[in-house]
Amino acid sequence: MAVELNKNELKDLLLDSYELIYKIPPPKPPKYEVQSRSKLKNLPEALRESSDPEAAVMHFVKSASYFLPRSDSNLRDYLDLLLKKVQKIQKSDSDPEKVREKIKYLIGYSNWGMDAVCNIFKDGSSDKEVRARLQNMVGAELKILESTEERDKIVNDLMEWKASAESRRY
């Protein structure tokens, strides 16, 4: 049975996914690659380890808690926020399968968003162009969910993430 999510649930997951992106150590310019990308991309695998959704969520939490800080100590803030988002999802829904599905969406949106944003950073010739492309992408996502008021804040936060990457010494 497929789990259906409504617009408000999708909106919350999308907004939470952007919050997670900001906690990822900034991508290294000029290619704007996230150093721990493969660990982040593999997170959803732990949710598929068990047919029992509650056991799968437990396995996910244990797996993320173990592997993320070991792969990159700079992912501790990301892990802390991820675990808070998982608890938020668990409090918002009593259906274990829906909880698992929401966590999959959260991680998927965060990973897709991270990749899309890094590509925009890499392909942009100026901050003005990067900002315009981010406004277009984020605006389109939020318009579908009938919630465009957060666009400028998200774009500003992404531009700050980019600036922190450019000022960092690698």
Image: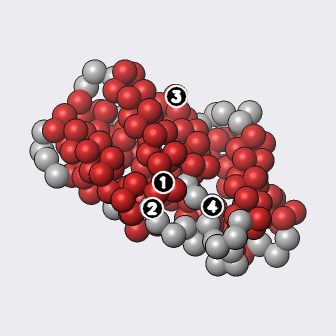
Q: Mark 2 points at which residue?
A: 72
Residue 102 occupies quadrant: top left
Instruction: Classify 53 as above or below 135.
Output: above
Label at residue 8: 3
Q: Is residue 103 above or below residue 121?
A: above
| View extreme (bottom): residue | 30
The residue at the point 66 percent across, 33 percent down is 147
Can residue 102 be seen by looking at this rendering? yes
- Around disc 3, counting alpha carbons within 10 Å, would you say few (fewer than 14), some (14 to 19), or many (20 or more)? few
Residue at mark 1 to residue at mark 3: CA–CA distance: 28 Å
Labels 4 and 1: the sequence-earlier one: 4
Residue position marked by numbered label 1 in the rendering:
75
Give left or right: position of 48 versus 28.
Answer: left
Give the alpha-carbon distance from disc 1 to disc 2, as whole Å.
6 Å
Tell me the quarter of the image containing the N terminus: top left
* Mark 4 crowd level (few <14, some 14–19, many ≥20, 10 Å Cα): many
